[in-house]
Structure formats: C-alpha cells, structure tokens
Amino acid sequence: MLDGGDSLSGEALHPTAPRIAVVAIVLSFALAAGVGILRTVNGEPVERSAEVAGNLAFTVVFAVPASLALLGLRRRPSLLVGAGLLEFVFAFLTLISIGLIFVVPGVMFLLSAGRVQATGTRPVASIAAVILAVVLGTGAFFALFARDDPICWATNATAGESVRLDATRFFDGSSGSMSIPRGASESGCSSDFISNGEALLGPAVVAAMLGSVWAVSSRDGDRPSPQVDSRPEHGGVAQR
C-alpha cells in the first residue's frame, strides 16, 4: 500500500487481455480451420491425397493473424495491428470465395490494439513489427504457390476409383489440355497444387515472421518499471 490510499494493483501491473481480442483470436483460429477443411472437402480424391501436408500448411498460414494476436497480448499492441491488417490481406486474396469473413476479426484486432497497455513503446520498432508481419505473412501465403505443380487424375469406369496421372503428358508449362482416357468415366487436371516442398516453405516463413516480429516489437516489460522507495519522504512515498 502507498501512503494516501494509492495502491499498485495487480491489474495495473498485469492487465487482463481485452475480451474483444480473445473473441477475435478464437474466431480467427476457427476461420483458419474452416478454410483448411473447406479446401480439403472441395478437392478431388486424388488432390486430397496429394495435398495432406499442403492443406495443413494452408491452415497454418491462415492462422497467422491469431498467432500474432496471441503474442500481441503480451503488451505488444503493434502485433495486434499487424494481425488486423493481415486479416484484411487474406480477405482480399480470397475475395472471390469467402474473403469478407476475415474482415470481422481484422476489425476486432485493430480495436483491441488500443486497449492493450504498452507505455514507453518505441514507435520505430512498432512500425517495423507491423511491416514485417504484413509482408512476411503475405509472403507465407504466396510461398504455398511458389511454382506451378499441375496434377491430373482419371476415374476408372468399372471400379469407380480415381488414379493420379502423369501431368507432364498433358501440361506444357502452365497450360494444358486432356481428353478422357480409355476406360475412364471422367478425368480432370488442376494447374497447381500445394506440393510437399511448398507445404514446408509456407510454415517456415511463418516461423521466421513470428520470431522476427517478437524480436523487434516493444512492450512495457522491456523497460524497467519505476522503483518504489518504502522510506517516507515528506509524508509520502518517493519514486525514482
């Protein structure tokens, strides 16, 4: 207790996370899982078997804003800003499908950034953290599609099973065409799928981004807190 009735409350030293941020984090993780599941179920059987790692990496990349926000709750509001902006980027990249739903957690992250205490922050470090988050987070998405990896399949007319075909027979560069092979009821090709190499590259960029923004961002705890002198001085408590 301080003289005069003032006190250093636990809330002041360790502020609780804003409820809006917690809700946004849960929503963002749920949306990331949702797009991963949606991408899986919408694929052909051959695509699903070839993209097990790819669809998992796709989910990891879309969970980046929520991961950033979790770090931002440790008195790093700049990371909440980065999370919100990155949600807007993902909304734009997936605009033709379900992109607008990412705007909701994006707005919530930006609103919660103003409710996280971060006295003594360094503006340059905060700006650098936001830029790194947006640039590398966007880069992680494009890393999943770093090169064209076509995939083709055909469904056996008798057994009804889909088999993977050699895509180089039907694709020349990024363009290709195919006819239904003999004995097949249907066939198709996709100009690109997430290969195992790309499935490793995307999360690797995510890990590099999370580590870099944590290193450059600033928070209250990075600076020494005021020391309280318990010796009375002029009827009160001296701080230095």
Image: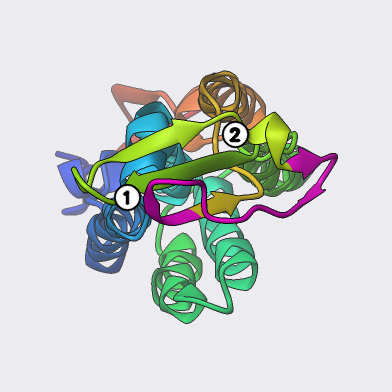
Q: Which mark is residue 40?
A: 1
Residue at image coords 26%, 40%: 14
Q: Which mark is residue 218?
A: 2
Residue at image coords 63%, 37%: 140
Looking at the rendered structure, the secondary structure element under dot 1 is helix
Residue found farthest to the right: 173
Residue 121 appears anywhere in the view: no
- The region drawn magenta spans 171-187
Residue 74: x and y in percent read: 38, 37
Residue 93 colored magenta? no
Residue at image coords 57%, 62%: 90
Residue 2: x and y in percent read: 21, 41
How many numbered discs?
A: 2
Front: mark 2 or 1: 1
Looking at the rendered structure, the secondary structure element under dot 2 is loop
Residue 125: x and y in percent read: 73, 37
Q: The N terminus appears in which quarter of the rendering?
A: top left
* Color style of the picture: rainbow
Q: Amino acid at mark 1?
A: Thr
Residue 43: x and y in percent read: 37, 53
Measure the alpha-carbon separation of dots 2 and 1: 38 Å
Residue found farthest to the front: 182
Residue at image coords 48%, 69%: 106
User: First in sequence: mark 2 or mark 1?
Assistant: 1
Q: Which image quadrant for residue 30? A: bottom left
Q: Which mark is residue 139?
A: none
Q: Amino acid at mark 2?
A: Ser
Residue 172 colored magenta? yes
- Which one is in front, 116 or 53? 53
Q: Which image quadrant for residue 150? A: top right
